[in-house]
Every structure is written in C-alpha cells, then in structure tokens.
Image (spheres, coloured by chain):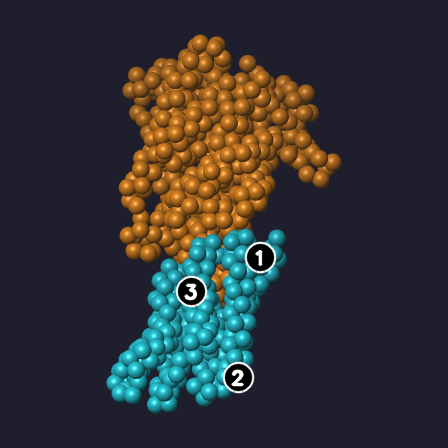
Amino acid sequence: MFLFFLSSGLFLGWSLGANDAANVFGTAVGSRMITFKRAAVLCGVFVILGAVISGAGTSDTIGKLGTVNALAGAFIVALAAALSVYIMTVIGYPVSTSQGIIGAIVGWNLFTGTLIDYTSLIKIVSSWIACPILAAIFSIILYKLVVFCIKAFNIQMFKLDSVTRYGLIIAGIFGAYTLGANNIANVMGVFVPVSPFRDISFMGIFSLTSAQQLFLIGGIAIAIGIITYSKRVMMTVGTGIMKISPVSAFVTVWAHSIVLFLFSSQSLECFLISHGLPTIPLVPVSSSQAIVGAVIGIGLLKGGKGIRWKTVGRISVGWMATPLLAALISFISLFFFQNVFQQQTYKPVGYIVSTAAIERIENQGISTDKLKGMLGKEYSSAFRFNNALKECSFPRRGRDTRFIMESTEYHKMEITGTAIRSLDAKWFTEEQIQALEKLEGRVFTHTWMMDEALARISPSWRIKKDDTLFNRRLEEKMDHIYDLFHTS
Amino acid sequence: MEFDFFTRRQGIETRIDEFLNRVSEAGLIFKGAIVDYLKGDLQTFENKRDRLHETERQGDVLRRELEHMLYTKTLIPESRGDVLELIENMDRLLDHYKSAMWRIDIEQPQICDEFHEDFKELVACGVEAVESTVCACRAFFRNIDTASTHMDKVIYWEKKSDVVSTRLQRAIFRHEELRLSHKRHIRDFVRSMEKIADEAEDVIDRLSIYIIKRAL
C-alpha cells in the first residue's frame, strides 16, 4: 500500500528529472558539447548521490511547513504538485516542483485545519525571490572572473573549447548533485514523516536512515525521468531558450549550482554556525529560477538589450501561478479522497487546555485569564482551537499564539520498556537511554511535558545555549521518540 | 574520454597550422614562379607550377580532414560553421594561385619588359595580402586581440595592389606598339593578379564578423 501511495511522489520525481535536468546539462547537450547519453548517466548518478547524502537539510524545512501525517495525504500532496507542474508545462510555463509542492502542502494545511507556519512559509517564499537574484549576482561575478582569466591567460579557441567542455561537465555534475540535495525534499519530503522504512546498515560500513532510503527511491525516480524524457527538454534549453555562448552557458550552470548548494548544504550551515556567521536557510529552491536568474544576470551585464522581458514576465507569472494551482488541486483532491474514497488524508491533531498547559503559558508571561474559561475543553484541529481563541477575544501575537498552540497540542505518549529497547544505541547516548528508562511507565499528554521530564533527569536531554547543531540533533531525537512512544 | 578531447584538440590545431603553412608556401612559390616566367626561365617556372599544384593538393586534403574532424568530433560547436567557412575561403586563395599559374602556363602571355617591375610588384602585393590574411587567421585561433593588426595590413596591401594595377593597366593601354588584342590579354592577367588581394580582403571582412561573434 505504501508503494502505491509513494507512486505520486515517484511521478513527481520523474517529472523533476525530465524537466530540471535540462537546467543542469541542457546547454552542454543542446550545443553538442557532450552527448546526451553521457550527460544522462552523469546527471542520474549525481542526482541520486546528492539526494541520499545531502537531502536531509531542505526536507526539515518542508516538514516544518506542514507535517503531512497520513500516507494518503502525502500521496495527494505529491500528486497535486506533480499535476500542477504537468499542467503548467502543457500551458507552456516554466515549471518548478518546489513551488508546486509548497502550494500543495499549504492546500493540505487549509484542508486539515492545520495552522500554516508563516515563519517557514515566509522563509520559503523569500528564498524564491532571493534565488534568482543571487543567481544573477553570481553569474555576473563569475562571468567577469572567467572573461578576465581567458584574457589574462590568452586561452586560444580550441583550448577554450576543451576547458569549457570540462567546465560544463564538472558544473553539470555539481549541478546534478545540488539538484538532488536541494530538490529531493520536493519529491520525498512529504513522505518522510509517514515512512515505514527502518534504518538499515550495510555490514557496518555505512547505514541508510529511513529518510535516506526514501531519498534513494526518489533519486532513482528522478534519474529515470532524466534518462527517459529529458533529452527533448535538454535540446530545447540548449538551442532555444538559452541561445548563449558555451562560456556563458558554463557560467550560468555554475551560478545555478552554487545557489542550489547554498540553499541545501548542511555542511556549509555547520561551517557558518561554527564561525558565528549568519546562516542561509535550507530551503528547496527552484533550479529553473536559478538558471533563469543566472541568464538574466549575464544579459544585464551585456547591457540588458538581449533580454526578452516579455518572456521573463511570463516566467514570473508561472512562478506565482504554480503554488496557487497546486494548493487548489491539493485542497479539492483531498476533499474527494477523504469523502468519496474514504481514505484518511491526515491524522487529526487535537488540542486540550489542561491545567499544566495553562501553567506553562502563564510562566511564559502570557495572560491566561481568558484561557482559563476554556479549561478542560478539547478541540479537534488547530483551526477550531484558533477560532475558539478568536471568539474569546484572546489578545493575539504571532509568537504567543504559537506558544499556546504548542503547549496545548495533545499528543499522548506512554514510555514502555519495549520501545526503549528498540532505540538505536548508536544514535542515542547511554545517558539518554538511561534517562528514558527512569521514566518507564509514565504517561504524557503533551510533548513538552516529556521534554521537561527528560531535561530534569539528564543534561543530555537539555537544549544547549549557542549550540545550534546539538540542538538540531536533539530535536531530531525528540521527534523520533514522540512517534515511538505515541499511543492513542 | 577527457584525454580524447585533449588529443582531438591537438590534432585539429596541428592541421589548421599545416593548412595555413600550405597557403603561405603557395604564395612564395607563386611569387617566385612569376619572376621566373618574366625572366623567361620556363623550366624553373614549370617546376614551381608542379610544386604549387602539389601544395594545393595537400591543402585540399587538410581542408577535408579539418571539415571531417570538426563535424564528427563535435569540436567548437558554436564557431564550427565560421571556422569551416574561413578554411574554405583560405582554400579559395590557394586555388586562385593555382589557376593563375596554370593560365599563364597555358596562355603564355607576352608581357613587355617595361611592365615587368609593376607586374612583379602587383604579384608581391597580392602575396603579401594573403600572407597577412594567414597571420590574421592564426591570430583568430591563438590570440584574437592581435588579429586586427594583421587585418589592417591586408587592407593596406589591397589598396596598394589597386594602385599598381590601375597604373599598369593605364600603361598597357597607352602603349602604342601593342595590338588591342594583346593589350586586352595582358590586362586580363593584371586583373587576375589584382583579384588575389581583393579576395584576401573579402576573407578578412568575414573574419572580422567571426571575431565580433566570438567577443566575450
């Protein structure tokens, strides 16, 4: 059944491979600098590697926007994204799977009554604006640099030809890797929370987490898309849209790949954190946006006369229309799937105003006078709870509301010995497992209650100030145990 | 596969160089042969005619190899058409040397002594124009920024060729002892020699467009 539901994700992966691979190798193949066969093999292999090795970063952001917590829901979300991408392609607008999936998740949020995390949404949408601008800036800088080098080293025509050829191959490989790393979240991100896979280890040499196994399958779907259907698109990109010289093509592919790398590299984020520098959000961005931005950058550098602004305008309309269309398809499809086919498209997340929750909210300095009137009441969705808060004219501030929602979210968990013993001893430290053992038999109704109980017992479960990396790992472990000990 | 690109590149560069060497060599043979003809040394002229014929044949072989390599090995895809056109135009200059030589050999024009110096000068202008075109072509492949210097030289030699040709034709038609048919026969040869520099100029006109197209 899981594989059936996964099929929509695989369809999305296939269409991503068929379309977006052209951004990476299109100019090289279209201008016949390298053969399609060679490009397809290289692109396929490195997309899979990028997805499996570095795909986790952007998936986290997608997860934060809306944890699609039922398999059928994930199926519809991926299908809505794939359909919106397909429809936009048929109409003739440049596609973006990133915008499709985000729109589809927002559609799921609206249907299920889950509150949209506007912080994550704004982060994602602003990255869509930043992505082409950054790509344009990078392409201008790179172009200047490349031209300077060609002139300084007096690179002759045939040497330049072979250097460009190598450059396009390396840029293509890098581009394919970053495409896999950045865009796998679009294809498989929604399935991560509902994945039935368990972590597997290959003779102790290396192991694949459940998410990585999903990414591997998604990566293979992308690779199949590249091999089976990307040739025509590559030829179109190489000879039609991007009628630019191989040197410019080389620059645009590099600029595109760097931007995708910036938005997907956890290693870079770690490096920036360790040096106290501001980080770049790990967000799935559109490779089409990046390549279009890079081409515009070169066009602007050459005076801007060669840019077809009408086409640019059309592309921008496509970028705005895709998420809206995906949200609409997602919403309508979820309605039909839930009510006609009787499939569970989401697991309801309830809210309960408990004494403990009120106490926690009060400690945060938020007035709870109006909340006390709601004591003991249960709400079946975030939407209903939010409406109830509105009805009792609860003074609303974004951050306070989020804290109240988090404090009242009902998630019953029972700490059992069997579940503790199933924990991966390599992932969880001995101290952490011992702390869990001390809580054996206890029942919690809110996730934060378990957080606090664990933090009281052991420092290994406490959030550390100024250690973002440790805190992120801790968050991942927390998410895992919330699911593990969950009981209805 | 990467090393493949490297050897392909080297192969094509060597062939282009060899082809351009043939064009230069043909110019020197042609100039020498005309001098020999004017001196009346027909034996040496015939030897040079055969040498020029062989050089032109070698040039044709190299041109075909280059065309084959550029298309089958998918090299410089964006400039391939321009490079092939350039090589074909240079080959036309080589052909012009050969056909002019054969025409002299067949028609054996009687060129009066008083026209010899101008005739030699006219041929020298044509050969110099072609030689500068060869240099401009080499620069196009190696150091594109220096190509314009050589192209200026071609224009200079073409203008000089026009001046010498006009002077020579005027002298021919003002010669009182020659029959009109004789005058027209020699005039045809003068025009043929003048055409060498004209064709060289046509080549660099096209070359200047290729250079603009390759501008970064």
**N-term mark: 2 or 3:** 2
Amino acid type, residue under disc 1 in the picture: Phe
Image point (42%, 65%), residue name: B89
Q: Tell me residue A356's x, y (percent).
A: 47, 20
Q: Which residue is mark 1?
A: B5
Neighbor class of circle 1 (other Cα within 10 Å; few <14, some 14-19, many 20+) is: many
Tag 3 residue: B89
Res A351 label:
none
- Marked residue chain, label 2: B
Mark 2 and mark 3: Cα distance apart in space: 29 Å
Closer to the eye: label 3 or 1: 3
Taking depth in this image into account, of B14 and A340 the one nearest to the observer is B14
Is residue A301 visible in the rendered image? The answer is yes
**Amino acid type at mark 3:** Asn
- Gap between marks 2 and 1 measured at Cα: 45 Å
Above or below, A343 relative to A18 = above
The chain letter corresponding to orange is A
Task: Single out the mark in the foreground, 2 or 3.
Answer: 2
Q: CA distance from mark 3 to mark 1?
A: 27 Å
User: Mark number for residue B44?
Assistant: 2
The answer to whether tags 2 and 3 share a subunit is yes
